[in-house]
Image (cartoon, grey):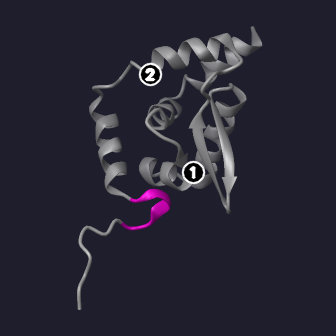
């Protein structure tokens, strides 16, 4: 029962559901999640710890940041089932669509997007 409760707790917070939906499209650096959700680094770290403990996400250290992605084949049958269902849910949610659009406009890890190359 503990395993099920960990997964349900992880999905009981709108911020964590949002993070999972964003991670559904690609791996994200913690700095990208911070920038997208406009939350403090300790808040994002806490969310990621809960998601990781539930077996929903995994991270890898790159320099001083951690890059997160959804676990491809979760060990937990509860995590596996809910991730499969979540992948199809909320695809037309206006808030998530806006977040994704804003993330696509920004370069990974906070580097500015250069629309045109400046010529002297």
Q: Which residue is mark 1?
A: 30
Query: Is residue 110 a member of the stretch shown in magenta?
Result: yes
Residue drawn at x 36%, y 58% is: 106
Q: Position of residue 105 (x, y in %)?
A: 31, 55
Identify the image quadrant of residue 116.
bottom left
Q: Quadrant of the N terminus?
A: top right
The quarter of the picture where the C terminus appears is bottom left
Mark toward the start of the polypeptide (1 vs 2): 1
Residue 111, quarter of picture: bottom left
Circle number at residue 87: 2
Q: Which residues are magenta?
A: 107-112
Question: Element type at marker 1?
Answer: helix
The mark tally for this picture is: 2
Instruction: Farthest residue to the top: give it.
Output: 1
Element under label 2? loop
Queried whether the magenta region covers residue 77, the answer comes back as: no
Tell me the crowding category of disc 1: few under 14, some 14 to 19, or many 20 or more residues within 10 angstroms, Cα based.
many
Location of residue 18 in the rendering, given as x and y in whole percent from the top left corner:
45, 34
């Amino acid at each position: 029962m503990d395993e099920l409760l960990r997964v349900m707790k992880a999905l009981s917070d709108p911020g964590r559901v949002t993070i999972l939906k964003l991670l559904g499209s690609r791996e994200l650096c913690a700095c990208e999640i911070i920038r997208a959700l406009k939350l403090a680094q300790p808040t994002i770290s806490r969310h990621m710890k809960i998601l990781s403990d539930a077996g929903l996400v995994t991270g890898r250290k790159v320099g001083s940041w951690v890059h997160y992605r959804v676990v491809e084949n979760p060990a937990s049958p509860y995590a596996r089932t809910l991730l499969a269902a979540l992948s199809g849910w909320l695809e037309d949610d206006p808030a998530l669509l806006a977040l994704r659009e804003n993330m696509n406009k920004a370069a990974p890890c906070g580097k500015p997007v250069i629309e045109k190359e400046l010529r002297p």
